[in-house]
């Protein structure tokens, strides 16, 4: 039962990196408890107990009791910070829960079975969305939604509306038409003929060379034409001097 899961918490007066480091060395974790009708409280909680909750089947949707010196407050893990190098928890946010007030939670979707579109028709099964959002009372938060996809044919889709939603307990907030998974055709690129590939890769070097060569020839011819009048001038000047 959820009410048997207890996380020990103690108020902490000081903050800062040094205080957080000291707490972690003592097996404690900096935390904040907020939400509901109460004020936000800075706490030090038991690291092992919080880690066990995150590793459990219900994960971050686990409903537990925060023990504040004998006074228990129901809560769930709202957010957490993990060291990217060591993987150790650095900080957690705890959200107060009112047992008679509906709340929004995200629930993982897990599929099982081999789709017929993969087994028979050679398609590829792809998961598009791994969780959906619902609204329910804290005591009715599901661990997961499990769906048998063995009947999923080629080009067929599993949508949020197809989930086994008990409307007496849960209200689906995710768009009903949201695609969660589908079976698609494996895309294979068609090989182009060798001639087409050669034509695409060939560079238009020849026309440029021809054009360039023509300019060079024209330039040489122009230089010769310009040189002829000058040579004629020199000849005429020579004759005049004589």
Image: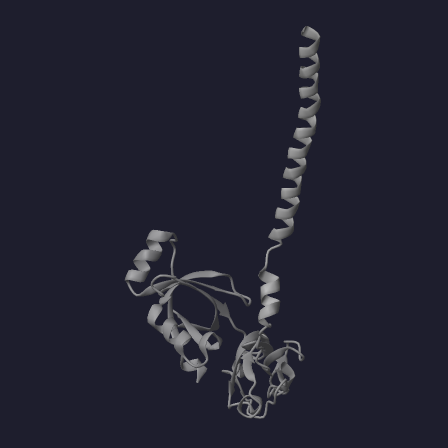
Q: In this view, does 160 lie above or below 208?
A: below
Residue 38 shows in this picture: yes
Q: Is residue 81 above or below residue 76?
A: above
Tell me the residue at 28%/61% (across/down). 25
Whether residue 157 sits left or right of residue 82 in the image: it is right
Q: Which residue lies furthest to the front in this view?
A: 242
Whether residue 20 sits left or right of residue 100 in the image: it is left
Q: Is residue 24 above or below residue 194?
A: above
Q: Quadrant of the N terminus?
A: bottom left
- Find residue 186 and report its image quarter: bottom right
Tell me the residue at 63%/43% (across/down). 213
Nearest the viewer among 195 and 158 is: 195
Give the x, y percent position of residue 154: 61, 87
- Find residue 145 and report its image quarter: bottom right
Tell me the residue at 68%/6% (across/down). 241
Nearest the viewer among 173 and 227 is: 227
Give the x, y percent position of residue 62: 46, 77
Give the x, y percent position of residue 176: 66, 80
Residue 69 shows in this picture: no
């Amino acid at each position: 039962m959820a009410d048997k899961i207890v996380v020990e918490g103690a108020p902490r007066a000081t903050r800062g990196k040094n205080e957080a480091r000291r707490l972690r060395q003592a097996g404690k974790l900096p935390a904040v408890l907020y939400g509901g009708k109460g004020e936000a409280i800075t706490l030090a909680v038991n690291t092992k107990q919080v880690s066990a909750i995150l590793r459990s089947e219900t994960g971050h949707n686990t409903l537990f009791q925060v023990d504040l010196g004998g006074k228990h407050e129901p809560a769930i893990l709202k957010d957490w910070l993990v060291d990217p190098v060591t993987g150790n928890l650095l900080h957690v946010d705890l959200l107060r829960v009112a047992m008679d007030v509906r709340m929004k939670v995200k629930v993982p979707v897990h599929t099982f079975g081999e789709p017929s579109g993969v087994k028979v028709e050679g398609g590829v099964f792809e998961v598009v969305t791994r969780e959906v959002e619902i609204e329910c009372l804290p005591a009715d938060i599901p661990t997961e939604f499990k769906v048998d996809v063995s009947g999923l044919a080629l080009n067929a889709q599993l949508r949020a509306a197809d989930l086994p939603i008990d409307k007496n307990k849960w209200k689906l907030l995710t768009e009903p038409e949201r695609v969660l998974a589908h079976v698609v055709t494996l895309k294979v690129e068609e090989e182009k003929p060798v001639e087409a590939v050669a034509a695409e890769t060939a560079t238009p070097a020849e026309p440029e060379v021809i054009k360039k060569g023509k300019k060079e020839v024209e330039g040489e011819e122009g230089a010769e034409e310009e040189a002829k009048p000058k040579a004629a001038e020199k000849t005429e000047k020579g004759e005049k001097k004589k």
